[in-house]
């Protein structure tokens, strides 16, 4: 039992020749062999040295032999299962399945004005419940929907938000780390009966892994959870301005993390992703929504399919628009469908508005329609005697014949179409008569319905809630001892 997701039923789109794929892969290996990576973790450096890496302890730089790189890449499973609170929401990453996931935002945003602010606890819960209810939303990103909520100390926000996620949803969740909270979060997940996906080996581009990131990765593996390897280069700033060069460096960073993961825990479950963007040369900020992001992801999906390792894409959710408007729609829809047809295992989509600055449950509801449309597209066209319907065509014949009253139409029209739930599908006269309502209005109405009717499929037991409270108290005391919180 697991979530179905959407199954791509045609060969993935390739943008590179096989020769170009090999050229970029070779460049990534050369980067690790010649330049290496800075790894600010002594245990990791010793482990690499024992496995034939050249280590400069003074500079904390390791250079990787090609044989080790290839062996560690081969150890990564091509597909694997992750456990949600409810078994029906387990995920199987890899193969031709595409999942859609939510995206975080620091603040809640008004869907009409673009004004944003900290979310209240109830607004946090409401956004989680919306995501739990949406049929095409498969799993939660790290610190989603918001970076915590009002009334929670900064160092506690990530953990307290995660608790709201597992309390009000049974879908699988990712979870980042901060301020040494990882062990407490892993224990909470164990109590809740689920796994989490932590981007343990989170690379700082260019080519650097902090002590904190490596330690998070090692702790993730010690708990037996799948581990993410993540990076976030900016083309023209922390990576070459050229897409091919940026991919070569980006993948070298991911491979460095994979080597550490596979040396620490051979054949462990590894998921790779990143947050690539070109630099906006007009203001020095990341250029969210640029078509270069989609080109990067399409090419890189092809490369990671060649490696045989599941890869997640992020470009579709991060737009430069601050509003739920046309720009927002085009900047998320184009990359999302290109990611889906080129072999991404998961696609960031739901709720994010302008980078990770804001999240909106209204945007999530609209994104559910977008995911449904993309999912219907990648499921392709059924071609057989029944769908060609040659006998029926002969039977109906010429005008005034028609297909409206035929059983075949009744049986097939909903399979062939995807009908959006929150789109304006009225004729123009109907639209005027109904008050000229737009998609945001319909999404707001759907949100009201969800919050009135939807319930989480499996509630946490009283014993689970009490055990989680005890772990939170331990974390609170830990931060008091560290001086991060006052007693």
Image (cartoon, grey):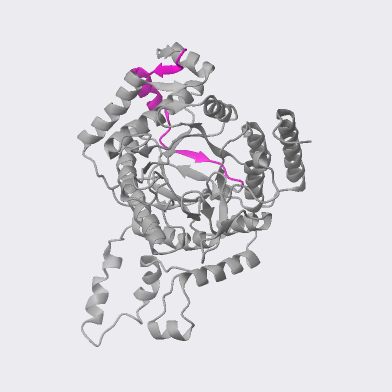
Quadrant of the rendered structure where residue 416 is?
bottom left
In percent of width and height, residue 101 lies at 49, 50
The answer, for residue 37, to whether it is visible in the render is yes
Task: Specify whether residue 68 is painted magenta.
Answer: yes
The answer, for residue 376, to whether it is visible in the render is no
In percent of width and height, residue 217 lies at 53, 29
Task: Specify whether residue 211 is painted magenta.
Answer: no
* Residue at figure coordinates x 35%, y 74% from the top left: 408
In percent of width and height, residue 367 lies at 46, 59
Please identify the residue farthest to the bottom as the structure is shown: 400
Give the left or right position of residue 340, taking residue 213 as reference.
Answer: left
In percent of width and height, residue 224 lies at 57, 30
Does 28 appear above or below 147? above
> In the rendered structure, which segment of residues is drawn in magenta?
58-85
For the C terminus, the quadrant is: top right
- The number of numbered badges drawn on the structure is 0
Give the left or right position of residue 303, taking residue 473 as reference.
Answer: left
Q: Nearer the viewer, residue 150 or 66?
A: 150
Does 168 appear above or below 227? below
Q: Nearer the viewer, residue 371 or 388?
A: 371
* Residue at figure coordinates x 25%, y 35% from the top left: 21
Please identify the residue farthest to the right as the structure is shown: 487
Q: Nearer the viewer, residue 262 or 210?
A: 210
Q: Nearer the viewer, residue 137 or 2?
A: 137
Does 410 appear above or below 365? below
Does 391 appear above or below 337? below
* Residue at figure coordinates x 50%, y 48% from the top left: 356
């Amino acid at each position: 039992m697991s979530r179905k997701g959407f199954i791509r039923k045609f060969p993935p789109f390739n943008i590179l020749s096989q020769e170009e794929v090999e050229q970029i892969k070779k460049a990534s290996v050369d980067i690790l062999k010649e330049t290496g990576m800075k790894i600010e973790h002594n245990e990791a450096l010793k482990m690499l040295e024992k496995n034939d890496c050249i280590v400069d302890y003074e500079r904390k730089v390791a250079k990787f032999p090609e044989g080790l790189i290839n062996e560690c890449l081969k150890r990564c499973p091509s597909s694997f299962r992750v456990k949600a609170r409810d078994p029906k929401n387990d995920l199987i990453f890899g193969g031709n399945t595409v999942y859609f996931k939510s995206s975080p935002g620091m603040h809640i945003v008004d869907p009409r004005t673009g004004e944003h602010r900290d979310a209240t606890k109830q607004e946090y819960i409401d956004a989680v419940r919306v995501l739990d209810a949406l049929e095409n939303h498969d799993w939660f990103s790290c610190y989603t929907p918001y970076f915590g909520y009002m009334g929670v100390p900064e160092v506690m926000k990530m953990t307290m938000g995660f608790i709201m996620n597992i309390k009000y949803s049974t879908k699988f969740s990712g979870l980042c780390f901060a301020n040494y909270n990882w062990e407490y979060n892993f224990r909470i997940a164990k109590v809740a009966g689920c796994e989490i996906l932590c981007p343990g080996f989170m690379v700082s581009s260019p080519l650097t892994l902090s002590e904190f990131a490596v330690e998070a990765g090692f702790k993730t593996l010690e708990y037996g959870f799948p581990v993410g390897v993540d990076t976030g280069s900016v083309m023209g700033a922390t990576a070459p301005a050229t897409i091919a060069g940026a991919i070569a460096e980006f993948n070298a960073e991911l491979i460095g993390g994979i080597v550490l993961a596979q040396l620490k825990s051979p054949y462990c479950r590894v998921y790779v992703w990143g947050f690539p963007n070109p630099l906006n040369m007009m203001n020095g900020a990341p250029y969210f929504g640029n078509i270069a992001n989609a080109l990067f992801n399409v090419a890189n999906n092809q490369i990671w399919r060649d490696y045989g390792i599941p890869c997640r894409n992020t470009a579709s959710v991060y737009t430069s628009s601050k509003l739920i408007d046309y720009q927002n729609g085009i900047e998320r829809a184009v990359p999302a469908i290109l990611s889906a047809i080129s072999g991404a295992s998961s696609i960031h989509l739901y709720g994010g508005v302008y980078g990770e600055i804001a999240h909106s449950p209204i945007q999530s509801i609209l994104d559910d329609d977008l995911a449904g449309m993309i999912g219907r597209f990648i499921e392709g066209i059924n071609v057989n005697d029944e769908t060609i319907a040659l006998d029926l065509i002969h039977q109906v014949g010429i005008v005034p014949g028609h297909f409206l009253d035929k059983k075949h139409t009744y049986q097939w029209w909903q399979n062939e179409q995807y009908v959006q739930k929150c789109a304006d599908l009225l004729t123009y006269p109907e639209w005027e008569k109904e008050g000229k309502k737009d998609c945001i209005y319909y999404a707001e109405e759907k949100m009201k319905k969800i919050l009135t009717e939807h319930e989480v499929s499996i509630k946490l037991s009283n014993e689970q809630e009490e055990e989680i409270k005890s772990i939170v108290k331990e974390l609170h005391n830990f931060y008091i001892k560290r001086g991060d919180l006052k007693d």
